[in-house]
């Protein structure tokens, strides 16, 4: 039985995920896939030779990226994770001494004590957070947190290329195509606009905000499911199935207008049909990009 998800808190009104244990599991899986495919946490163009770097992870969620980084850098590095909510933070017993977690709204005002503090700022998967197609306010906040010549690494999806791939023409992907259509329609109704995530667009936005672009990976490593290691291909599709189920049912649970013309029963049929198609080899695909910029002196 597929049921709409009850919203977690009133301040989650515009957040399309739930911060539940299921959502935390999805984030762990997403992190593993990206790390395994890309081969890094911090892009190799970012120097790692300093003994006392300060690193911030924005939208840290369950802090999986930050805790993984903590295991591979000197303990003299100071690592700080920030999120709007602390609901997914790990228990203190699992947080190393050089890691701190805290809450603040990355789209609001940056606290004065966080301005100009960090050598590296990392952010991942804010496509559903940026509304109206303008990441400028968020980007300016991130830049304000950097020291001069500090690095910003932004890992982002590109829903412009959200597609389903069948292993052969004989295998149907009609439900997979439909569930992607539902998701993109919901996103549009929530003012999640896609042009700023298109290939090359983020790098242009970085330059517009006076960041030197030192890396812009868009589609050269992520053009289709065949680019992934075999061990990752089903995991990537499964991860997106989890995200689709979570977001659409969460919107239904909130009574969002984004899903006003879709019943739980109808979505359940689309989702179950997609699940059957993926068991027959259909894969869901969405591009990932990694853009790294450096702040001026």
Image (spheres, rainbow, N blue to C red):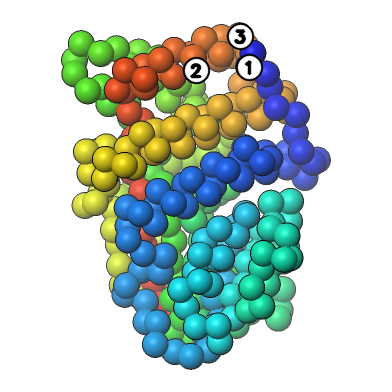
N-terminal of the pair, mark 2 or mark 3, is: 3
Q: Please determine whether, in this image, residue 239 is positioned above or below residue 253.
A: below
What secondary structure is found at the residue carrying circle 3? helix
Residue indicated by mark 1: 2
Given residues 94 and 16, the one toward you in this image is: 94
Q: Are marks 1 and 2 in contact (CB under 8 Å)?
A: yes
Does residue 145 appear in the picture of this structure? no
**Separation (CA) of disc 2 from disc 3:** 10 Å
Q: Quadrant of the N terminus?
A: top right
Residue, disc 2:
271
Residue 265, position as x, y percentages in the image: 61, 9
Label 3 Cα neighbours within 10 Å, binned few <14 / some 14-19 / many ≥20:
few
Identity of the residue drawn at 44% across and 32% down: 238
Label 2, residues with CA under 10 Å away: few <14, some 14-19, many ≥20: many
Q: Residue 265 got which mark?
A: 3
Can the viewer see residue 123 in this picture?
yes
């Amino acid at each position: 039985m597929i049921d709409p998800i009850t919203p977690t808190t009133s301040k989650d009104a515009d957040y399309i995920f739930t911060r539940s244990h299921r959502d935390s599991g999805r984030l762990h899986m997403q992190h593993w896939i990206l790390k395994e495919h890309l081969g890094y946490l911090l892009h190799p163009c970012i120097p790692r030779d300093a003994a006392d770097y300060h690193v911030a992870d924005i939208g840290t969620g369950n802090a999986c990226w930050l805790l993984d980084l903590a295991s591979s850098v000197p303990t003299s590095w100071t690592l700080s994770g920030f999120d709007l909510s602390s609901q997914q933070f790990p228990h203190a017993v699992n947080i190393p001494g050089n890691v701190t977690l805290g809450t603040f709204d990355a789209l609001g005002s940056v606290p004065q004590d966080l301005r100009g503090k960090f050598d590296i700022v990392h952010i991942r998967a804010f496509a559903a957070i940026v509304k109206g197609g303008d990441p400028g306010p968020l980007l300016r906040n991130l830049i304000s947190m950097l020291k001069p010549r500090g690095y910003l690494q932004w890992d982002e999806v590109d829903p412009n290329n959200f597609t389903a791939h069948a292993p052969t023409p004989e295998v149907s992907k009609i439900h997979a195509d439909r569930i992607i259509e539902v998701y993109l329609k919901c996103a549009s109704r929530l003012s999640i606009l896609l042009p700023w995530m298109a290939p090359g667009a983020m790098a242009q936005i970085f330059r517009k905000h006076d960041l030197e672009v030192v890396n812009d990976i868009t589609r050269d490593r992520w053009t289709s499911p065949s680019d992934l290691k075999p061990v990752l291909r089903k995991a990537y599709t499964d991860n997106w199935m989890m995200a689709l189920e979570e977001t659409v049912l969460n919107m239904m649970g909130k009574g969002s207008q984004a899903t006003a013309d879709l019943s739980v029963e109808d979505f359940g049929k689309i989702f179950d049909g997609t699940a059957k198609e993926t068991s027959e080899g259909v894969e869901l695909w969405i591009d990932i990009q990694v853009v790294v910029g450096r702040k001026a002196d």
